[in-house]
Image (cartoon, coloured by chain):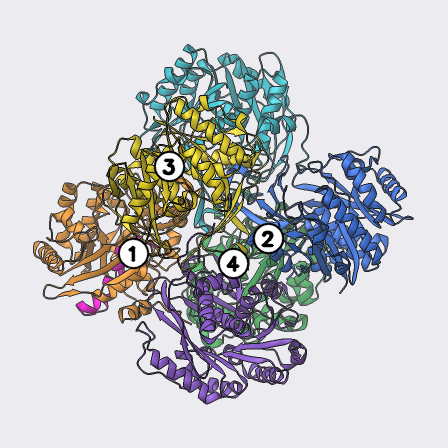
Chain colours: A orange, B yellow, C purple, D blue, E cyan, F green
Amino acid sequence: MKKVVTFGELMLRLAPQGYYRFQQVDSFGATFGGGEANVAVSLANYGYDACFVTKLPKHAIGQSAVNSLRRYGVNTAHIARGGDRVGIYYLEKGASQRGSVCIYDRAHSAIQEASSADFNWEEIFKGAEWFHFTGITPALGQNMVNVCLEACKAAKKAGVKISCDLNYRGKLWTREQARTAMTELCKYVDVCISNEEDAKDVFGIEAANSDIYGGKLDKEGYKSVAKQLADTFGFEKVAITLRTSISANDNDWAALLFDGTDYCFSKEYHMHIVDRVGGGDSFGGGLIYALLEGKSTQDAVEFAVAASCLKHTIEGDYNMVTVDEVEKLAAGNASGRVQR
Amino acid sequence: MKKVVTFGELMLRLAPQGYYRFQQVDSFGATFGGGEANVAVSLANYGYDACFVTKLPKHAIGQSAVNSLRRYGVNTAHIARGGDRVGIYYLEKGASQRGSVCIYDRAHSAIQEASSADFNWEEIFKGAEWFHFTGITPALGQNMVNVCLEACKAAKKAGVKISCDLNYRGKLWTREQARTAMTELCKYVDVCISNEEDAKDVFGIEAANSDIYGGKLDKEGYKSVAKQLADTFGFEKVAITLRTSISANDNDWAALLFDGTDYCFSKEYHMHIVDRVGGGDSFGGGLIYALLEGKSTQDAVEFAVAASCLKHTIEGDYNMVTVDEVEKLAAGNASGRVQR
Amino acid sequence: MKKVVTFGELMLRLAPQGYYRFQQVDSFGATFGGGEANVAVSLANYGYDACFVTKLPKHAIGQSAVNSLRRYGVNTAHIARGGDRVGIYYLEKGASQRGSVCIYDRAHSAIQEASSADFNWEEIFKGAEWFHFTGITPALGQNMVNVCLEACKAAKKAGVKISCDLNYRGKLWTREQARTAMTELCKYVDVCISNEEDAKDVFGIEAANSDIYGGKLDKEGYKSVAKQLADTFGFEKVAITLRTSISANDNDWAALLFDGTDYCFSKEYHMHIVDRVGGGDSFGGGLIYALLEGKSTQDAVEFAVAASCLKHTIEGDYNMVTVDEVEKLAAGNASGRVQR
Amino acid sequence: MKKVVTFGELMLRLAPQGYYRFQQVDSFGATFGGGEANVAVSLANYGYDACFVTKLPKHAIGQSAVNSLRRYGVNTAHIARGGDRVGIYYLEKGASQRGSVCIYDRAHSAIQEASSADFNWEEIFKGAEWFHFTGITPALGQNMVNVCLEACKAAKKAGVKISCDLNYRGKLWTREQARTAMTELCKYVDVCISNEEDAKDVFGIEAANSDIYGGKLDKEGYKSVAKQLADTFGFEKVAITLRTSISANDNDWAALLFDGTDYCFSKEYHMHIVDRVGGGDSFGGGLIYALLEGKSTQDAVEFAVAASCLKHTIEGDYNMVTVDEVEKLAAGNASGRVQR
Amino acid sequence: MKKVVTFGELMLRLAPQGYYRFQQVDSFGATFGGGEANVAVSLANYGYDACFVTKLPKHAIGQSAVNSLRRYGVNTAHIARGGDRVGIYYLEKGASQRGSVCIYDRAHSAIQEASSADFNWEEIFKGAEWFHFTGITPALGQNMVNVCLEACKAAKKAGVKISCDLNYRGKLWTREQARTAMTELCKYVDVCISNEEDAKDVFGIEAANSDIYGGKLDKEGYKSVAKQLADTFGFEKVAITLRTSISANDNDWAALLFDGTDYCFSKEYHMHIVDRVGGGDSFGGGLIYALLEGKSTQDAVEFAVAASCLKHTIEGDYNMVTVDEVEKLAAGNASGRVQR
Amino acid sequence: MKKVVTFGELMLRLAPQGYYRFQQVDSFGATFGGGEANVAVSLANYGYDACFVTKLPKHAIGQSAVNSLRRYGVNTAHIARGGDRVGIYYLEKGASQRGSVCIYDRAHSAIQEASSADFNWEEIFKGAEWFHFTGITPALGQNMVNVCLEACKAAKKAGVKISCDLNYRGKLWTREQARTAMTELCKYVDVCISNEEDAKDVFGIEAANSDIYGGKLDKEGYKSVAKQLADTFGFEKVAITLRTSISANDNDWAALLFDGTDYCFSKEYHMHIVDRVGGGDSFGGGLIYALLEGKSTQDAVEFAVAASCLKHTIEGDYNMVTVDEVEKLAAGNASGRVQR
């Protein structure tokens, strides 16, 4: 069982049922999610020893967060316990022309106030083959930048591959803060995942001629972004996810994977969306699995895109699919027929 | 804070969850709605002093109806209390080729049995700038025709603008009854809102060459309807809403606003519908706001159509959107991306 | 009131709410369904004396199954009571590229362990005009093959028309078992309902040039399948349902009815699906009604397809529509407008 | 299968979940209930041909009301269809010192506006052995008094026993109206069911020394009420239900049955209440069954009280128990142990 | 309409349905509550102009908090808007021997980080007759101690009566911090509400011989506590609430009101609890109403205890009762009979 | 972390919400439970390495069963995967005089059809200190008797203590079958758990003078049962649970633990029940923990009874309590006060 470590925040997600707006309801679905935890669940569902590292309070809500991961077989042995609160995000699902709304209430969470002393990276990376984090973790504060650096160094020392999803969040830090921290961290990264906006927001790297609010994808532009990222940081591989947002319900979804030599574009899927949150993370989970399994660049990007296509049909942050289900879709069966 | 008065019935809406049919369920969502109340909620959400006038029983169900308005900041100070029952409508949401079903149980409601003595219009219109009602209110009975007339006269006397949505309901009165009453009432109206069917049902005014069951919109025809309405009643402005019903889930939606000189058509939106009820009312609310804010004819119709486009993505009768959200859509951001 | 008898298994259907996957939920919707029972409910809703025959345990869950039919007016007087368990199927609704999943837990159900002694066919067919079963019933075991044969013989003796939906289920029996049993049973059948796959799976009858995973319908191919079926078994009429699965949410749906002379294709509907299960059964129910009412071949297939189109908009196995609703859709009103 | 006919109104019951107050909720449980329908369901559950007679609208809500009875096997063949509305009652469940609240919205219901022409009593009573109604039915209006009289006369003519539960409702008619109508109707009644309040409200018959708001039962007083009722109207049997209301959650419950000779008091049960509505009706259903089965006076009152004791543990108006469950409780097993 | 001002924090209350523990659920009921807001809702339900003052974020969750008050008619005109988060408390309802669990996540809420500049007390107290706060508000931080002092001084200046519920919360501040702050604040207070524990925790004032974990009430001890409080701070009136906790479901509840001369004990109620939270606040609301209405000391304590007894039967923090309902219970009708 | 192994069946529990009867609902709560799995969850919640052994199908429902244990930290590494079905039990919660109803649908489950080859006991018991099973496991069939014997022998060989809860289930086997199998298995058992009925049903061992349907406990009788059990099988310790069933809502609960020398009775708790299922298992879990922690006989029985008292307040089969919560109750704090 291959071991992958991911590190970040796990938040309580409070969301009205269906398409209700926040102000209409008096109950919230209460599940958990967060970029790196979502990747861990994907990998646990693929049969890996997915070890998620974070810090969570000792009280019952913190325990519920841990349980949400144990339920799907994630290794929670290295989660530090302590601190006062579980970060929260309120999610209102959009429809048609009305976009989803996300309100963060994550300041002062246990992980935000964690320190180096909470994590024994040498121990954590024992037996691991891969380490994954996203740009959200260092965005939580300077202590998290430091911890991420420590983790990256320990990973490198242990011969563990590192992937990072740039994932820029403008509500957490400024572009300048992001650029400074991510420039340092990316020195350790082998596989970079980004979308067009992130590359621009974090590093100022841009593709010409594309319109993220609904225009057609510009293949040459994306190749240029991937190349620039690889050249700047020496990434072994760069993945660019390509989302065309037709409406809150309907998106087109594809990706490009650049391995230093070839630019492999995946098939494009037209998706009727059930839940869009975690879509990017499920791509990351799929990509890590595909690369660890030794798939070709084309097969890897097809697996990762098929995995995240399926995620868009699933409620909650976590991608609840098996390798078999992903393989079938990647192989071309997208008809959605009843399996009986 | 601009004050707008609306007058009509507020009903209890009993609706199965999701797409269940009436005979399948043993619980109903129990919210409240009604054409003029829906307009009031729209305007309260835009920050106005929206004063809704009706009559409701003193018991707890009547109080719940009042509370449903107070919750969103509607001014309920002039709601008369008394009578026996809250009108009810049962709503079954349609899907695909199956249309929504609406069963009215509104006879003998408190407002239907109200009389002139229940409303002090002079008091109600103090400080008001606009008065809105729909063709549903006079359709409730001759006493309501009379009360509407009294309201219109008092509004005119107080220098208050009047808008009316024709809203013909064949289950409440005949075309002849409607024509007689509405012809009288329209004398006081400044801004008329209609769809193609209403203009024909109430006043026999028709546009040639259009097919409400799915055909393409005929722009010239709609301009002709607007012109005829304006000419007949001396309306300052006439708005025609343009719905193309592809299926119960998918509608196209646009409108025309005629200001006596220019015919301004809005953008057309393709909507994947969450809840279609109150769609017309949200147009009315948007139009009143836009006109009171002094927007141009083109900007006003764009605002009103964007507001009602968003309504179609929201559960319940009430349009739960802010000015900012409407402006963004009217300005062209229809991609439904996550706001985070 | 015309009497129709149907015979088969009624199962408890356990399904997560909305689009949740099995492993995400801690409650299941608990309704009942099964091919022949679904047909009976359709016919009861059309006003017929629909008599459903099966065997169910005496305990409260068995009683709930009976009640689910009585609720909609199905005649349950000939349901044998006894045995240990109600068969179960777990249903997970798919979305977009993710197909629905069906897990059967129906082995050892009361009907699977029933015998000839449980059914008095002479009594059951008194006053009946039609008998319907599907290929699922004999697939439940050799005793059920025998009981089906007894039923068919008794029906023939009583002058009752027989229809059969081939409905091949690979999880219940092999193609060879199916061919042997169905070849024998089809000798008694007057009206055969099939889709392209069933004809091939059960009898090896194929149409060239069609792709069930999303390709365009090949009219000539379907005609050929119908003709072969009619010629082989002497069926009076053969109906072929034609589904194009674009995604789990979007299907196209049509049918062909061959009466020995004419090949009548119905209109094709593009459906946005609420619940796909029972779609075929609702076609069967519609067809039986249309034929018993003496409709023409073209009108019959239009009625049956319109009925099943509406079923796809309804939650659960049972088709909850009236003759009037089906007629309206068959007559061309597919816009899904609000009925108020 | 013994046939019993009951006649009255079936209402839609709209109730918040659990102990929520009306003004706190935005959904209602939507079930059906009404004194005589409740008795019919009890009897259907005991295996009788329970024929409930009423009038209900043809629309889907009326059909749902019919279905709520068919589901439990009630004979609905003689329900007249027509009229505009299903009567409604809003029910808020009380707890501890807070009593339940019932708001009626039943005026103008189909049954209230029904007439003699809607019911063919001769046909209805074919094969029947018992007819039951309550004082609520004639309270619905003079036309209902007349129809009740017609029903009683037809019943007598057909040799059918008649029982009546006095069930005085002060919101429907005055004591004087009740006395006039019930005095006439009681001439036809064989078995009278009452509680202490009803006897006093309707006929002015009182027992001294008892306090319905929580005092101890005064056995002699109740015997005196039963005797006076029997003497005044020539009833064959008189049943008096004895409720001591400790709180909304806790009631003591017993009854007296007088057969002209013996005064038989049942055991008294201390009940922790799930749903109190329909408690009296379940007593009536139990009593009719016990008398039709030829039980002794003591056994009959024990059966009826045990049946209604169980009703208090069941949600909704309808008593969902079997003869076997009632017999076991009447025989003394009141420990509520798990049956496994 | 008498105006009462209350000041404090309004929190989002996240609670599993029924008696589920935190770790079992994936949804939370999401309502709002907080000591002083609860008092405001009580008073709004009694028909007063109840003006609640706090600070809440501008986002949709902050708006939902405001709406939860507007719904019940609370005056929200003086709620400052800004800051980052709405305070949260997680509530798990206990049963029998398992106590309820409350986890606070209220640090850094908008009100905790508010300052004097957010509140214009002179404006707020215009027309007011009463000001109420609890010991929770100053416990939120030194800035809140200061704001409370400013409020008290402004109230005194405006001739407004002041009541304070000591409400010691050991998780928010130490006994020493509480004593220092409350000693200063109590100089302005006219009516003090406390329970035995609070008096001891905050001021070290104790009654001998009482056992808060289930023993019998010691009347003399409570009189001594009331007297000591009144003597120390010059309170005009002191109320002591008396809870005997038999189990999480069953409590006895009474109170003592001392007016400087008389010690008036209320009736004691045995309560079967629906929701215990807000019980003390509903006492405060009842007491303020009773005193403002000029009731005698005995009548005032009876009204306040009856009001809070009813609160224990109501879900959520807010007491949803009318004056009429409280008066009836105070007058002795505690049988919980159905009101129909 | 001490390792405890338990072995048995894990079933899907399908239960109507609240107090609804089976025939009233169209959804079921879907959780998992089973005697030995319940013990494992208790122990995992106490911080042990609780290893549950069973066999479950590979499909999604089987996976959900596994996940229900992983969620709470149970070690599922030795669960065999295969077979066709997850056993089911339908549970209807009783109230007051109506007892709970349990309908088993567990025949042919994966574990019932498992064989010795599915379990490697030597591997399973590595590092373990305790093995627990109940009389339900061998009752599943002769293969399970054999597997239990193999497990017991392997446990003995590995120096692992063995406890067994007799748990006689008359629906699974006869008294004679039970006696034969359990007599053999009990040779290996160190700690026996029983209630009065089990001892009698399985071994014919009886205490005089006690009435399980509500009478008072007879201490001498229970001591005699414990002594007889210990003497017959050489048990080191015998625990007898003592339940007095006042009603479905109210039970008294205590236990006796005999250690060969002393007979220690626990305190008796009066419980207002939330969910009674799993009550005995939570006693077993508490007892194993207390004995492994080296508590005295009196302290052990107090811990076990307090643990199971708390279980009765918790929904579902699993006991969701911490050591700390149990210790507090055992130490005497049974007032159910809010913890805040």
- The disc placed on residue F38 is 4
**Which amino acid lies under the numbered mark 4 shown in the image of this protein?**
Asn
Identify which residue is drawn at 18% across, 68% down. A298
Q: Do callouts 4 and 1 mark residues in contact (Cβ within 8 Å)? A: no
Q: Is residue B55 magenta?
A: no
Residues rendered magenta in the picture: A275-300
- Label 1: element kind: strand
Q: Tell me: residue C201, above or below residue B269.
A: below
CA gap, disc 2 to disc 4? 47 Å
Tell me the residue that label 1 is attached to: A250
Q: Chain of mark 3?
A: B
**Which amino acid lies under the numbered mark 3 shown in the image of this protein?**
Ser
Q: Tell me: residue E57, above or below residue C83.
A: above
Pick the residue in front: F287 or E35: E35
Tell me the residue that label 3 is attached to: B42
- Label 3: element kind: helix
Q: Do callouts 3 and 1 mark residues in contact (Cβ within 8 Å)? A: no
Q: Quadrant of residue C20?
A: bottom left
**Which amino acid lies under the numbered mark 1 shown in the image of this protein?**
Asp
2 and 1 marks on the same chain: no
- Percent coordinates x, y for residue A97 in the rendering: 30, 48
How packed mark 3 is, by other alpha carbons closer than 10 Å (few <14, some 14-19, many 20 or more), is: many
Task: State whether residue D88 appears in this view.
Answer: yes
Tell me the residue that label 2 is attached to: D62
Q: Chain of mark 2?
A: D
- Label 2: element kind: helix
Q: Nearer the viewer, mark 4 or mark 1?
A: 1
CA gap, disc 3 to disc 1? 27 Å
Q: Is residue C53 left or right of residue C211?
A: right
Q: Quadrant of residue F3?
A: bottom left
Farthest residue in the left direction? A231
